[in-house]
Structure formats: structure tokens, C-alpha cells
Amino acid sequence: MIRGTSNVISIISTVAPKGEGARILCVDDEVHVLKGLERSLRGKNGEWQIDFVTGGEEALQLMNGHSYDLIVSDMMMPGMPGEELLGIVAELYPNTVRIILSGHYNQSTAFRLVGSDHLYLSKPCPRDLFINTIEQALYLKQSEEKPIEPISHGELVDVVTILIKQLLVQQTITLAVLPINLRAKFLRHGLQEFAPILNADGYTKGSVGAYVSNYLDDVDYGEMSDEDSWFTEKE
């Protein structure tokens, strides 16, 4: 239940035990909305710590003493509107993900929020969409905070090779845009890709034949050498 006055934090409940899972703060001046959110999030019991408060000032008081991973706020609230609250949160706690959950959204609001990096959900919000949005936002936050693991030269070559092959097969790029020393490599890759679908009667017919013909036309045999290395410096 709600307790206290305007000078006291009004917390409805904390779903998960302290010290476990991501910390989430929900802010709305309407108690029945907070209770609805609490019911929606009961399935995450044990995964997230979730606090509920009834105003922006209360939210900032609570955030002053606790670190939150994500805040969900209503837009239209007396005292401190959600837009102002999330603006302050963005300045003071830039690593906290911010979600607006509101039934009041118009073109004027949209223009004001451009560039704010707030996520937006409209009321009424389906439970699955609400939870999925929080999960995805927390996943992205955790991914950004993880140290970037170094990638080896060989792993980089493999990744780029796969990407270029996909772009060639999709005809997004042609061999002509590749450096000369890469064309031989991807010509061989390309023929290996086409081989299973070609036969003696059909290799020059239809779309496959036309594509292979174009593929081969992109290669300048006079300048290409199998000895050329790629992604390495020439000695």
C-alpha cells in the first residue's frame, strides 16, 4: 500500500529481494496504475528489484540513495512532469535507461522528445510488450557496459569474408568494387556457391547463368593474381 506524505518516499512494493537482479523504478501519480504495473511484473519475481513511487520528487529522492538500471515514468504528473523527471535523470544518471509510459502523446510532445534517447510506450500497454521492452533495454545496457573483447586477425578475416560473400550473393555489391587482390578469392568462393545449382545444360541459361556471367565479367583476369594476399601488408 501507499504510505507517508509528500516528504516521504511512497513505495508500494519491492518485488525482488535486495541485491538480486536489475533495479527498476516505476513512477506514476495514479496508484491504480502502479498497482497494475506491480501485477504485470509479478512474473519477474526474483529477477528484478522493482520500486514504485507516486511522483518525480520522490523518485529523485530514492535515486539519490540507490542505483537504478531503468526507470519507467508517466508523462503527465502534478508537480514534476515525467518529461522533466527523465531529463534530470538523463543528466544525473546517464547510465539509467529511461522509458516513458503514457497515454498522453501528441506531435508537440514528439518534437520535444526528439534526441532525448527516452524509450516510449503508450498506455494501455500489453503486458508482454512492456516486459519485452524492459528486457531488451536491460540487455542492451548490459551489452554496452561489458568490456569489448579483442578479436583476432583470423576471426576478423572470417567475419568480413562471410559478410562480403553475402553481399555478393545478394547482388548488393559486385566484384568490381573489391580490391584486385580480393577478387580472385571471392571468384573462387562464388563459383563454389554456384556449383551445386549448375549443370551442363543450364549453366548459361536463366537468371543463374546471367548472374554467373555478370559475376565473371566483374573480374579483370589481366590484373589478378592468386598469389596476392588479402588483409595483410605486402612485403
Image (spheres, helix red, strand yellow):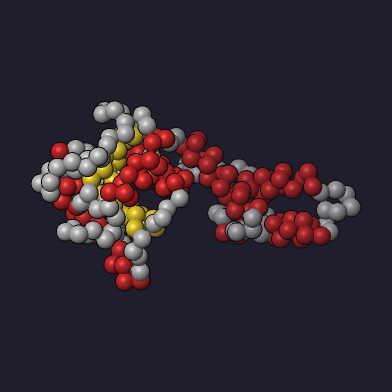
User: From the viewer's perspective, is 155 left or right of 222?
Assistant: left
Of residues 225 and 12, the one nearer the viewer is: 12
Residue at image coords 26%, 43% = 52
Query: Which quarter of the figure is the N terminus placed in?
Result: top left
Residue at the farthest right position: 201
Residue 97, position as x, y percentages in the image: 30, 47
Residue at image coords 38%, 44% = 134
Residue 189, position as x, y percentages in the image: 66, 45
- Which quadrant would residue 35 be assigned to in this image? top left
User: From the viewer's perspective, is 192 left or right of 81?
Assistant: right
**For the image shown, how many numbered marks are present on the structure?**
0
Of residues 83 and 144, the one nearer the viewer is: 83
Residue at image coords 27%, 49% = 31
Residue 88, position as x, y percentages in the image: 19, 54
Of residues 50 and 215, the one nearer the viewer is: 50
Residue at image coords 39%, 58% = 122
Residue 99, position as x, y percentages in the image: 33, 52
User: From the viewer's perspective, is 126 left or right of 32?
Assistant: right
Residue at the farthest left position: 7
Q: Is residue 94 visible?
A: no
- Image height check: is 169 above or below 159? below
Of residues 185 and 66, the one nearer the viewer is: 66
Q: Is residue 198 visible?
A: yes
